[in-house]
């Protein structure tokens, strides 16, 4: 797939995700050939699709497909997913009532302990989703800083505001660089941890920039914040994965070079 084809695919996916979410989006992506693209070109399908899910605020049960495909099983079903704190959840294919109080839009509910599945591919997908969610929050905060006037000056002219936005951008760019370099299970683990931490950093800084309006139900920020919290907990939170990575490195007695400069 050349650059022009990738651009066309990205625009098609963005338009589709802007118009639909949940079960309707899942059906639309199926019609667009999501399963075939995942099977034939996962290196394109996963980063592009999951990043756009974050940027648009849409959702679909595609994490199931990524994990099922990595396990060599047919896509289109569901499977139990480990969640932070030792619990397990199921991401349903329909739009039933959600079983989590963090994001009522997602059809997630507590499920039984599942059989082991390859988590690396799922962690990479979630990391791209978290990066996209963080960039959506950054875009909202940046636009507010440009439009809002305080004490006769644009909010974006205040150094404290600019520093928070800059720190958010650095965190997200760093997480994306970690994702690009993730080529094995440890790399996927670290990428998920970095993306989760970056999204939570974005939530914290962007809320500060937006102030009171960011807490209101009328503004979109709260949806992205809740989404980031839920996605961070899936397949291991940033805190848990950081501890796990430390234990692996301590047991191995050395730290591998993750990026060859």
Image (cartoon, grey):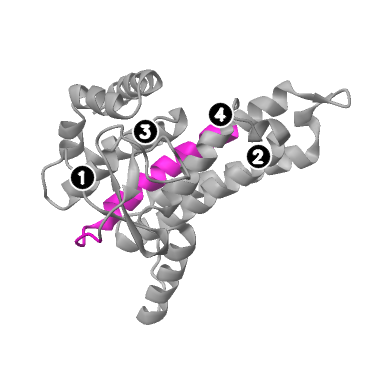
**Whether residue 28 is situated above or below residue 237 in the rendered picture:** above
Q: Which residue bears the numbered disc 1?
A: 78
- Nearest the eye: 7 or 3: 7
Q: Secondary structure at mark 3?
A: loop
255 versus 55 height, above or below: below
**Image quarter for residue 260?**
bottom left
According to the picture, the residue beneath numbered tag 4 turns out to be 220
Q: Residues within 10 Å of mark 1 (few under 14, many from 20)?
A: some
Dot 1: what SS? Answer: loop
Q: CA distance from mark 1 to mark 2?
A: 34 Å
Answer whether residue 214 is magenta in the image.
Answer: no
Which of disc 1 and disc 3 is earlier in sequence? 3
Q: Position of residue 217 (x, y in %)?
A: 59, 29
Residue 261 visible at all: no
Task: Give the label on residue 62, or none.
Answer: none
Provide the major secondary structure of the magenta segment: helix
Residue placed most toward the observer, 224 or 134: 224
Which corner quadrant of the image does residue 46 belong to? top left
Evaluate whether residue 184 shows in this view. Answer: yes
Query: From mark 3 to mark 1, how far is it between C-alphas?
Result: 15 Å
**Left or right of 181, for residue 41:** left
Q: State the extent of the magenta-drawn residues as a range.
A: 113-138
Residue beneath disc 3: 59
Q: CA distance from mark 3 to mark 2?
A: 22 Å
Spatial CA span between label 4 and label 1: 29 Å
């Amino acid at each position: 797939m050349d650059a022009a084809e990738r651009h066309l695919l990205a625009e098609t996916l963005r338009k589709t995700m802007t118009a639909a979410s949940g079960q309707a989006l899942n059906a639309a992506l199926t019609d667009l050939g999501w399963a075939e693209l995942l099977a034939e070109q996962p290196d394109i399908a996963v980063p592009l699709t999951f990043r756009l899910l974050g940027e648009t605020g849409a959702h679909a049960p595609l994490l199931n497909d990524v994990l099922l495909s990595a396990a060599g099983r047919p896509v289109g079903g569901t499977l139990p997913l480990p969640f932070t704190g030792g619990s397990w959840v199921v991401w349903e294919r329909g739009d039933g009532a959600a079983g989590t109080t963090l994001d009522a839009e997602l059809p997630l509910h507590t499920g039984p302990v599942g059989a082991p599945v390859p988590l690396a591919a799922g962690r990479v997908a979630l990391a791209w989703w978290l990066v996209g969610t963080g960039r959506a929050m950054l875009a909202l905060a940046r636009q507010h800083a440009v439009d809002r006037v305080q004490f006769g000056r644009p909010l974006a002219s205040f150094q404290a505001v600019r520093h928070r936005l800059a720190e958010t951008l650095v965190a997200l760019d760093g997480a994306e660089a970690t994702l690009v370099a993730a080529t094995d299970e440890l790399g996927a683990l670290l990428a998920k941890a970095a993306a989760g931490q970056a999204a939570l950093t974005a939530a914290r800084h962007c809320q500060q920039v937006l102030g009171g309006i960011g807490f209101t139900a009328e503004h979109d920020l709260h949806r992205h914040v809740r989404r980031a919290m839920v996605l961070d907990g899936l397949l291991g939170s940033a805190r848990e994965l950081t501890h796990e990575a430390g234990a692996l490195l301590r047991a191995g007695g050395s730290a591998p070079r993750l990026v060859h400069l």
